[in-house]
Amino acid sequence: MEPTQRPRERLRSRGPESLSEAELLAVLLRTGRPGHSVVAEAQELLAQAGGLEGVARMSARELERRPGIGRAKAAAVCAALELGKRVAKVEVPGAQLLERPETVAEYLVARLRGSRREVFGFISLDTRHRLINDHDLWEGTRNHVSVDPAEVFRTALLDDAAGVILFHNHPSGETEPSVDDIQLTRRLVRGGRAVGIEVLDHLIIAGPDWISLRARRPEVFLADS
């Protein structure tokens, strides 16, 4: 490969946005193995993992077991992906209005798309629908998490929240809400009314996809639901 076409050089001259996912991953891996370029190594890893989302789900030990990667490269990849998640967690400024589900969903997709287990939490908002805080309250198995409504509202009251947006992810990649999802949302909507905190929405995140339960099942959020 010509020096000017190498991923690291192109990143320096044109910026990281000019690189493909395989090339960005190649920068982290740094070197390939005999008869296998680093870009080819990255392409193979992405193909076998099912894309970047699949790589994000891999643990350091799983990456280490791949030929030519080892501990140092596995650590570099895992650290870079974790930094991306942490950046996503602080990217929504407190002054931003969170009135549109698209705004919240973009933030949550970046935070949760690599999670291998189901996570339930909520975003607390003030009276003008500005972010106060966000909370990952429970982490469950690959397809189930237990939720205590009392803990949700205890935490929201400590935030002095006027409203909350619930969220959880489906690691299976299926966005369709389950019966349990709908029943839980109903319970939390009712519980919120009892303590003066409005449940504004419940977003279900599945990899890069998401749905708004308020848009899909608006009757769940009605006063007589």
Image: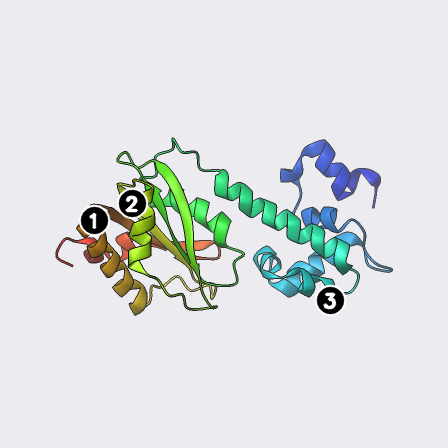
Q: Is residue 42 left or right of residue 106?
A: right
Q: Amino acid at mark 3?
A: Arg
- Single out the mark in the foreground, 3 or 1: 1
Choose between 10 and 88: the one closer to the eye: 88
With 196 as the anchor, is 48 left or right in this view? right
First reached walking from the N terminus: tag 2 or tag 3? 3
Determine the CA span between mark 3 and mark 1: 51 Å
Quadrant in the picture for residue 158: top left
User: How many numbered callouts?
Assistant: 3
Identify the residue position indicated by label 2 in the image: 157
Tell me the crowding category of disc 3: few under 14, some 14 to 19, or many 20 or more residues within 10 angstroms, Cα based: few
User: Would you name the residue on which mark 1 appears?
Assistant: 195
Specify the amino acid type for callout 1: Val
Farthest left residue in view: 224
Labels 1 & 2 near each other (Cβ < 8 A): yes
- Which residue is located at x 58 percent, y 60 percent? 57
Up-down: is 115 above or below 18?
below
Tell which circle, 3 or 1, labels the residue nearer the N-terminal end. 3
Circle 1 Cα neighbour tier, 10 Å, few/some/many (<14 / 14–19 / ≥20): few
